[in-house]
């Protein structure tokens, strides 16, 4: 097996430089990991699971105060990233040198074509103020949008939820007021629009990358 990587443009230097990005295709679930360890240690899966759970509890005790926890595979610590919407806390690991050397020795790299970027997906849009009002809404009501990869920065006018007139007679209108912005759900106030049919778009800029657009597969009927 090999680590599959794609060469993509560097989003930091933005000079056309290509950098490798790992394309994850296989996942090993916890049960499979425990089963493998069971055969190599002689410990039961239940004992191993208990040890992992206690390890997680220990990390939850030491990491929140900013401590760096040393382990046989490297040092673990928490880091905080700010994206303009909310603090994003992440668990980071600085790999132990000997462990990383072992990984490099046993790894092969295969360069593949870059996958298409993942874009926002809208699965459903409904007027939250009128029960069962799917694909329609009234100006001033809360539109409840569900899907995936929907998170965006509300204060960036290039991002957000946009209404595009199906008749192309009106300009694109951005939803300006939001009560919730999440990866799987967005709630916001329907702008003052003329009655009619509108296409719905969500535009995001993940981690400073170019704008990515996802469009709803159906039109929205807006009424006054």
Image (cartoon, rainbow, N blue to C red):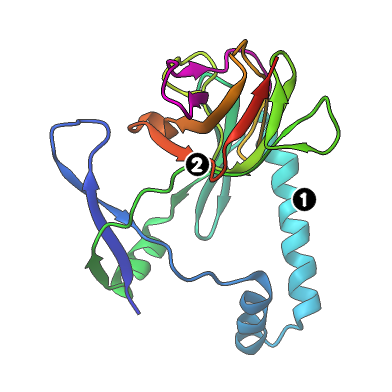
- Which of the labelled discs sits on residue 120, or is there none? 2
- Which of the labelled discs sits on residue 136, or is there none? none
Residue 98 versus residue 207 in the image, above or below = below
Q: Position of 50 compared to 137: left or right?
A: right
Residue 132 versus residue 24 in the image, above or below = above
Residue in the foreground of this view, choosing between 192 and 21: 192
Picture quadrant of residue 195: top right
| Secondary element type, mark 2 | loop
The verdict on residue 50 being magenta is: no
Decide: marks 1, 2 in contact (CB < 8 A)? Answer: no
Task: Give the x, y percent position of residue 5.
Answer: 29, 61
Q: Residue at x 13, y 38 (%)?
A: 16
Task: Give the x, y percent position of residue 34.
Answer: 67, 77
Task: Give the x, y percent position of residue 119.
Answer: 44, 44
Task: Give the x, y percent position of residue 107.
Answer: 31, 72
Residue 60 versus residue 28 in the image, above or below = above
Q: Which residue position is annotated with label 1?
A: 57
Sequence-wise, the earlier of marks 1 and 2 is: 1
Picture quadrant of residue 51: bottom right
First to last magenta residue range: 162-179
Picture quadrant of residue 218: top right
The verdict on residue 170 being magenta is: yes
Q: Mark 1, residues whose alpha carbon is within 10 Å: few (<14), some, or many (≥20)? A: few
The quarter of the picture where the C terminus appears is top right
Q: Residue at x 62, y 13 (%)?
A: 191
The quarter of the picture where the N terminus appears is bottom left
Residue in the foreground of this view, choosing between 111 and 156: 156
* Number of marks drawn: 2
Note whether residue 144 is visible. no
Single out the mark in the foreground, 1 or 2: 2
């Amino acid at each position: 097996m090999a680590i599959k990587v794609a060469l993509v443009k560097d989003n930091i230097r933005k000079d056309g430089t290509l950098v490798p990005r790992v394309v994850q295709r296989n996942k090993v679930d916890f049960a499979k990991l425990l089963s493998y360890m069971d055969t190599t240690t002689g410990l039961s899966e239940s004992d191993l699971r208990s040890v992992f759970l206690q390890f997680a509890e220990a990390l939850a005790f030491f990491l929140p105060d900013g401590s760096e926890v040393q382990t046989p595979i490297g040092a673990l610590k928490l880091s905080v990233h700010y994206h303009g919407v909310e603090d994003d806390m992440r668990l980071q690991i600085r790999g132990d040198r000997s462990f990383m050397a072992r990984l490099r020795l046993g790894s092969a790299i295969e360069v593949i074509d870059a996958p298409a970027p993942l874009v926002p997906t809208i699965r459903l849009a409904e007027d939250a103020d009128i029960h069962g009002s799917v694909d329609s809404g009234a100006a001033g009501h809360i539109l409840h949008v569900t899907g995936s990869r929907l998170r965006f920065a509300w204060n960036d006018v290039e991002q957000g939820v946009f209404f595009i007139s199906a008749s192309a007679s009106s300009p694109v209108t951005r939803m300006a007021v939001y009560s919730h912005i999440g990866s799987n759900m967005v709630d916001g106030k329907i702008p003052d629009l003329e009655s009619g049919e509108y296409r719905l778009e969500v535009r995001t800029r993940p981690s400073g990358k170019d704008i990515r657009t996802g469009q709803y597969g159906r039109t929205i009927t807006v009424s006054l």
